[in-house]
Image: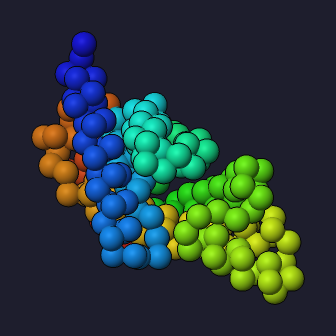
Amino acid sequence: MKNSHKLTVFLIPIGIAVNFICGQIVLLLKLPMYLDSIGTITIGALCGGVAGAIVGAITNLLISISNPTTMAYMILNIIFGLLAGFLAKRGVLNSLWKTVIAGIVFGLIGGGLGSRITVWLFGGLGAGTTGAITGVLMQMGFSASMGALISELFADIIDKVPTLIIVYFILKSIPARTLVKLPQGNMFIKRKGEPKEGQKVV
């Protein structure tokens, strides 16, 4: 087994732990976001989409032990891991403004697909804050489907933009000597003589 693959196997449980810990902190502090895919996206960016997808899938499996409804949304975390690997290969996560746009894209995917899952399996009323917002929107005359879409798009964009920004700074903080050992680590090594973001090349 290559050293990069060994390190990937080592990092997968760390990514799962980061997802779980961040998610629990958010629950304890009752913050209006999730922050439970930081590990998924970070590992996807550094080790490839498949590794990120594994982190996302196992995270949902573990959380579903105490909260079975999360199993229904496993596909979202798998998509986030795959997408992180794809975007990292194209240098998107090397730029802060591109990372913010990527966060919006993640939010649109999470909110759009997540709301469809909520409607198909739970009639549109999910758990937590999004379910409460959907209930209010339904009282205002919105259908369950539209209410779920609005509430989950809102919640996911608010969650995924900070999540991607956190991932961006995590990736920037990793030393080059560690990055070179990871399957996609070279994507985040600052090349000598490369202009800084926003710096004009004369």
Left or right: where does residue 136 sit relative to residue 129? right
Q: Nearer the viewer, residue 81 or 71?
A: 71
Q: Looking at the picture, how far across and down is residue 99, in whole percent?
A: 45, 62
- One can see residue 104 in this view: no
| Residue situated furthest bottom in the rendering | 140
Number of numbered discs present? 0
| Residue situated furthest front in the rendering | 66
What is the basis of the colouring in this image? Answer: rainbow
Left or right: where does residue 197 sit relative to residue 1? right
Q: Is residue 58 above or below residue 124?
A: above
Residue 196: image quadrant is bottom left
What residue is at 41 percent from the left and 76 percent from the top?
Answer: 31
Q: Nearer the viewer, residue 165 or 152?
A: 152
Q: Looking at the picture, how far across and down is residue 64, in whole percent?
A: 47, 44
What residue is at 42 percent from the left and 36 percent from the top?
Answer: 58
What residue is at 33 percent from the left and 52 percent from the top?
Answer: 20
Image quarter where the N terminus lies is: top left
Q: Looking at the picture, how far across and down is residue 119, in whole percent?
A: 76, 57
What residue is at 53 percent from the left and 46 percent from the top?
Answer: 68
Q: Is residue 145 above or below residue 184?
A: below
- One can see residue 39 in this view: yes
Q: Looking at the picture, how far across and down is residue 176, in whole percent?
A: 17, 45
Image quarter where the C terminus lies is: bottom left
Residue 54: image quadrant is top left
